[in-house]
Image: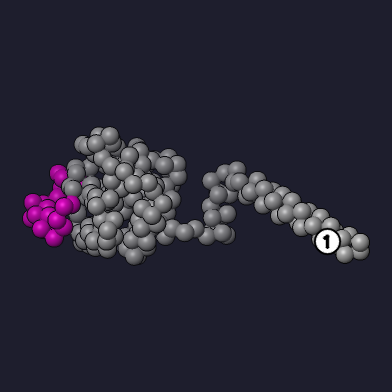
Amino acid sequence: MEAEKIKNRGSLIQIWLMFLIIGGVLASGFLLIPDTEEDRKKIMSLLGTTNTGEIVSPTVDFSSLFALPPSESSKWKIIVVNPGKCEVTCVDMTYSMRQVHMLLGKSTRRVERFLLTDLSVISDTTLEAIKSVNPFLNITGLDSSELKQIIGTSTAAWDMLSPRYFVLTPDFKATLFYTADHDPNGLLDDVKHLLKYSPMR
């Protein structure tokens, strides 16, 4: 009889512990919901994130910068956006993008690469050199004023004095960006992670 009481008491304790844990998790979730963008950044800095790039918030639609309609594309995109002349940094980032693409292994076919640059200021020699070193690279003319308008209210806005990487979903939504100072290995890790958890198309 005493053993039965002890067993019942143990079961009740387990049930109450379960409710306390669930309640604690739910309460923490509500308390951690940020009210402002500044609060969100503080929480992210405390908890850390799995990505090495910077999150584009809110998500930005880049589809108007491309000639290809979103409905005709089913691949993730890594792009180098270069508002000015494509000089050393731009050329290096474009090459690093190619290396990242190659290192995706069996997922390579799920990704395509783009260089968005001002074709009116890039020399033919530079353009041909980039094409020769980066096979299967899509080069698209960039309207800097349109780009500035698109990203103006997002965390991706910058002075456009240097190139940036962006990672785009198959429907041209920019989710992450990287400066020239970011390690391309981080870009590789992030793209692998996105492909792992995104549905095949």
Q: Which region of the structure is painted magenta?
A: 117-137
126 is within the stretch colored magenta: yes
Looking at the picture, how far across and down is residue 74, in whole percent? 28, 42
77 is within the stretch colored magenta: no
Looking at the picture, how far across and down is residue 58, in whole percent? 45, 41
Q: Which residue does the image show at 89% across and 60% down from the upper left?
A: 5
Q: Which residue does the image show at 52% across and 60% down from the upper left?
A: 48
Looking at the picture, how far across and down is residue 161, in whole percent? 29, 52
What's under tag 1, amino acid-wise? Lys
Q: Between 154 and 186, which is closer to the camera in this rendering?
A: 186
Q: How many marks?
A: 1
Task: Check the picture and name the quadrant holding the C terminus.
Answer: top left
**Horizontal arrangement in the rendering, residue 90 relative to residue 12 (left or right):** left
Q: Between 159 and 22, which is closer to the camera in this rendering?
A: 22
Q: Secondary structure at mark 1?
A: helix
Tell me where residue 144 sits by quadrant: top left
| Residue on which the image places disc 1 | 7
Q: Between 180 and 183, which is closer to the camera in this rendering?
A: 183
Q: Residue furthest right?
A: 1
Tell me where residue 129 sits by quadrant: bottom left
Looking at the picture, how far across and down is residue 76, in whole percent? 30, 48
